[in-house]
C-alpha cells in the first residue's frame, strides 16, 4: 500500500480522503491556501503546506506549488479529489513523470473524456447510447443553425470542454439559438480556454442518472450501481440518491452494462462516473459525460454497497486487488445525500460568512462529511459547499424519514444556508413519490 499521500484539494473532500488515509496507516499531507489555514483538513493532516494565496489559480491550481509541496514532504502519491486539478490530463502526466503515483485514471482516459464531442463519438463507437447531436464542433453560428435544424428543436448548446453544469444553454428556436451560441462560446473561451461548442437534442422532461464505475488493477471495469441526481439548480446537483427510484431491474442491467462498456472503451482505471440522461416516458437513456474522478456524491454509493471508494482508489493506484468480490456486488438499502451549501434557500445565491454555530446531526444511518466547524469562515473564493449530509435506511421511506430529522437537527449559524430548502423538499409530494425530474426545483420556486 501507498505509504504517504498528498491531497491536492480542500474542504470536505480533503478531510474525507485524509480520514481514510489515516485509517490505513498512510501519512496524510495537506496543501492549503492562506485563506484555508484554519480549516479542519489542515489541522487533521499529518503535515500541511501552504501553497499560495486565496486565488485558486495561485494555490490549488498552481501545479508548480503543489508538486513542490509533494517533493518537500516526501509524498509518494497524489490524490486530486474533485475539481481543481482532478481532471487535468497534463497534471496527471506531470505527476507520473516525476515518479509519483497518481490516484486517478490515466492521463489518456482523462483527455479522451474531457472533450465532450470526442467523448460522444467514442461512446457511440463503443455501443453506448448517445443523444442526437453534432459529431464535431459547430465551427460558427451558421453551422450551429444547420445542426439544430437537423437535430430538431429544442436543443442544448454546450461547451465541449465544460463540466459541472457550466457552459450550457437551451434554445427552443433559431432566435434563441443565435443568442445562446454566442453566450456559451464566450463563456467557454473565458472559463475553459476552449470555445468549442456542440449541439445536442434537449429533453424538456428528463432525469439525470449516473453510474459509479471502478477500473480495477487487473484491467476489469465494474459498476457499483446508479445514483439519481435530478434535484438540481442551474444544472448543478443539490441531492443525490441510490438506488434511483426511476430505474427498474431491467433498466439497471442495461444502464450498468453500458457504463462498463464506456469505461472499457478507454481502458479506464480507478474511480469514475458515467453520467446519463434518462427519458422517463420511454425508458431510454443517453450518455451525457464521464467524470474521470471521484464524485461529490460518492458517499451514497459507499453506504449502499458497503465499500470505501477512496480506499479502493488507493488500492487500484497501488496495483492491489479490491477489498470486495467484483462478481458479488449487490446494493443494500437506500441512501440520500443533501449538499449543505452557504447560499440562500430561495434564489441559491452565495452567502459566505463566519460560522458562529455548527451542530451536526447524529443517529442511526446518519453521516456528515463536513469541511467546516464552528469558528471557521466560509470565504467567497471557493465553492459554497460546506458539508454533505448523507442518510441511509433499509428503504427509501426510512432514509427520507431519517433525513427529515437530521435536517431539523443540523444547526448552522452565520452564513446563509440551504437547510430550509431541504426541509421543504423532504415534504414535497413529487419528491416523495420518486417520480420527479430535473425541473423539480424550478417547480418548487
Image (cartoon, rainbow, N blue to C red):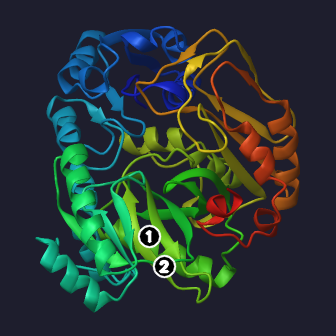
Q: Judge from the rendering whether residue 424 lies leftward or rightward of residue 100; answer left or right.
A: right
Q: Residue at coordinates 25% horizontally, 56% vertically from top-left?
A: 161
Q: Secondary structure at mark 1?
A: helix
Foreground disc of the pair 1, 2: 2
Locate residue 428: give its quadrant: bottom right
Q: Which residue is mark 2?
A: 203
Q: Judge from the rendering whether residue 132 lies leftward or rightward of residue 108; answer left or right.
A: right
Q: Judge from the rendering whether residue 42 lies leftward or rightward of residue 152; answer left or right.
A: right
Q: Position of residue 6 (x, y in %)?
A: 37, 23
* Quarter of the N terminus within the rendering: top left
Decide: is 397 above or below 409. Answer: below
Q: Please give the label number shown on residue 260.
A: 1
* Quarter of the C terminus within the rendering: bottom right
Residue 444, visible in the rendered structure: yes
Distance, label 1 to label 2, CA atoms, is 25 Å
Q: Position of residue 442 (x, y in %)?
A: 62, 60
Decide: is 444 above or below 94. Answer: below
Mark 2 crowd level (few <14, some 14–19, many ≥20, 10 Å Cα): some
Decide: is 290 above or below 376. Answer: below
Compare residues 266 and 138 and report the one nearer the observer: 138
Compare residues 400 and 166 and report the one nearer the observer: 166
Locate residue 343: give its quadrant: top right
Q: Residue at coordinates 44% horizontally, 38% vertically from top-left?
A: 314
Q: Secondary structure at mark 2?
A: loop
Compare residues 162 and 391 and report the one nearer the observer: 162
Mark 1 crowd level (few <14, some 14–19, many ≥20, 10 Å Cα): many
Q: Position of residue 307 (x, y in %)?
A: 62, 47
Q: Residue at coordinates 47% horizontally, 22% vertically from top-left?
A: 26
Q: Position of residue 197 (x, y in %)?
A: 22, 65
Amino acid at each position: 500500500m501507498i505509504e504517504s499521500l498528498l491531497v491536492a484539494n480542500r474542504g470536505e473532500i480533503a478531510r474525507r480522503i485524509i480520514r481514510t488515509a489515516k485509517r490505513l496507516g498512510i501519512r496524510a499531507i495537506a496543501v492549503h491556501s492562506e485563506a484555508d489555514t484554519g480549516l479542519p483538513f489542515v489541522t487533521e493532516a499529518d503535515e500541511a503546506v501552504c501553497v499560495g494565496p486565496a486565488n485558486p489559480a495561485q494555490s490549488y491550481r498552481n501545479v508548480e506549488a503543489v508538486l513542490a509541496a509533494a517533493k518537500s514532504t516526501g509524498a509518494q502519491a497524489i490524490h486530486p479529489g474533485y475539481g481543481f486539478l482532478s481532471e487535468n490530463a497534463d497534471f496527471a502526466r506531470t505527476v507520473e513523470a516525476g515518479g509519483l503515483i497518481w490516484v486517478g485514471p490515466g492521463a489518456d482516459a482523462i483527455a479522451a473524456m474531457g472533450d465532450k464531442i470526442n467523448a460522444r463519438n467514442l461512446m457511440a463507437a463503443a455501443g453506448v447510447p448517445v443523444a442526437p447531436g453534432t459529431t464535431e464542433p459547430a465551427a460558427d453560428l451558421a453551422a450551429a443553425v444547420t445542426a439544430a435544424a437537423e437535430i430538431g428543436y429544442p436543443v442544448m448548446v454546450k461547451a465541449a470542454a465544460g463540466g459541472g453544469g457550466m457552459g450550457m444553454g437551451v434554445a427552443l428556436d433559431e432566435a434563441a439559438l443565435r443568442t445562446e451560441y454566442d453566450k456559451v462560446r464566450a463563456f467557454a473561451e473565458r472559463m475553459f480556454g476552449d470555445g468549442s461548442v456542440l449541439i445536442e437534442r434537449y429533453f424538456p422532461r428528463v432525469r439525470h442518472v449516473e453510474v459509479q464505475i471502478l477500473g480495477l488493477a487487473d484491467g476489469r471495469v465494474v459498476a457499483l450501481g446508479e445514483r439519481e441526481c435530478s434535484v438540481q439548480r442551474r444544472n448543478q446537483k443539490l441531492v443525490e440518491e441510490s438506488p434511483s427510484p426511476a430505474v427498474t431491474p431491467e433498466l439497471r442491467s442495461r444502464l450498468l452494462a453500458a457504463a462498463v462498456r464506456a469505461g472499457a472503451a478507454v481502458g479506464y482505471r480507478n474511480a469514475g462516473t458515467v453520467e446519463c440522461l434518462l427519458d422517463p416516458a420511454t425508458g431510454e437513456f443517453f450518455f451525457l459525460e464521464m467524470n474521470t474522478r471521484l464524485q461529490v456524491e460518492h458517499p451514497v454509493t459507499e453506504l449502499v454497497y458497503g465499500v470505501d471508494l477512496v480506499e479502493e482508489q488507493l488500492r487500484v493506484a497501488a496495483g492491489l486487488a479490491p477489498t470486495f468480490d467484483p462478481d458479488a456486488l449487490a446494493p443494500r438499502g437506500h441512501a440520500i445525500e443533501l449538499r449543505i451549501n452557504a447560499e440562500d434557500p430561495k434564489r441559491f445565491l452565495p452567502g459566505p460568512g463566519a460560522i458562529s454555530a455548527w451542530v451536526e446531526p447524529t443517529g442511526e444511518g446518519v453521516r456528515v462529511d463536513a469541511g467546516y466547524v464552528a469558528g471557521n469562515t466560509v470565504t467567497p473564493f471557493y465553492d459554497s459547499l460546506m458539508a454533505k449530509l448523507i442518510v441511509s435506511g433499509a428503504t427509501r421511506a426510512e432514509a427520507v424519514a431519517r433525513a427529515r430529522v437530521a435536517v431539523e437537527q443540523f444547526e448552522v449559524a452565520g452564513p446563509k444556508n440551504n437547510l430550509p430548502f431541504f426541509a421543504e423538499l423532504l415534504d414535497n409530494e413529487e419528491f416523495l413519490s420518486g417520480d420527479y425530474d430535473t425541473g423539480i426545483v424550478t417547480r418548487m420556486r
